[in-house]
Amino acid sequence: MPLLHRPNLPRRSSFKAGCRPGKSLFGRLAEEKGLRTLLAAWKLLDGQVPLRIAGDGPLRKELEASASKLPAISFDGGLAREKVFDALEHARFLVFPSEWYEPFGCVITESFAFGVPVIASRLGGIQQIVQNHVSGLLFNPGDAEDLAAKVERAWTHPKEMEVMGRYARTEYETKYSAARNYELLMDIYRRVLKDNSRLPEGTHHNGGHLEVETGVTINPP
């Protein structure tokens, strides 16, 4: 059965050409998000690259303590969505170091909406969203040295990352925008209504909506 994911689209999005000042990570500060790998990578970078971490979670105190001697790292805590979008507008790239099989990373598509390329784990559905050397860079999950190498490359090749950011914005417009998601949703409705004549026993069409024995109702537009 095909699976459709409709991401939480940003209420606003923009693309600003040119070099941006920093890089960011947004998300829940938890074990599975690969944050210990992130800090280990930053220790290898020896303060060369500024990092802004936004979010909260059970690892926050541990991470802040570990980063206390790394002045390049700052913690913003939890941010309202509009503040996240403000930060994305000024980020040179975003790091997504998750170490579990994420089916979809909404923050990745939100970054794409702002023309921000993503450095992400080569894992699960993430590697299907971020195209290596096209809309971002992929690194081996849990490998601090590999992550540090990718971050250093991204930081020292801003023009290359700007090109990736332009492609990321194009990806957003063609796959993840509100208009595209509306098209996909309408296609689902059309297929459901078209297949009405082949519904399994116990399912019937009634008064413009689809009723299933489970109690789930799908209302067409």
Image (tube, rainbow, N blue to C red):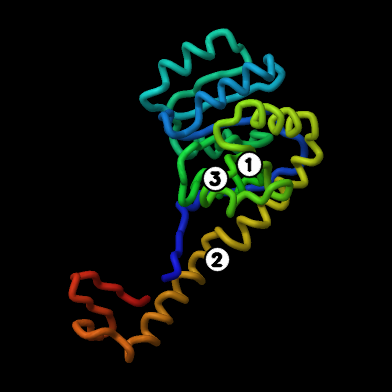
Left or right: where 24 falls relative to 31: right
Q: Amino acid at mark 2?
A: Arg
Left or right: where 197 falls relative to 102: left
Q: Position of residue 184 (x, y in %)?
A: 49, 70
Marked residue nearer the N-terminal end (3 or 1): 1
Residue 197, compared with residue 180, is above or below; it is below
Q: Position of residue 55 (x, y in %)?
A: 45, 29
Quadrant for the N terminus, please: bottom left
Between 195 and 132, the residue placed more toward the observer is 132
Disc 3: which residue? 123
Tag 1 secondary structure:
strand
Per the model, the C-alpha gap separating discs 3 and 1 is 14 Å
Tag 2 secondary structure:
helix
Tag 3 secondary structure:
loop
Per the model, the C-alpha gap separating discs 1 and 2 is 21 Å
Q: Which residue occupies the extreme bottom position in the image? A: 197
Disc 2: which residue? 180
Can see residue 63?
Answer: yes
Marked residue nearer the N-terminal end (1 or 2): 1
How dense is the environment of label 1, judged by Cα within 10 Å: few (below 14), some, or many (20 and up)?
many
Marked residue nearer the N-terminal end (3 or 2): 3
Between 146 and 26, the residue placed more toward the observer is 146
How dense is the environment of label 2, judged by Cα within 10 Å: few (below 14), some, or many (20 and up)?
some
The residue located at (44%, 24%) in the rendering is 77
Q: Amino acid at mark 3?
A: Leu
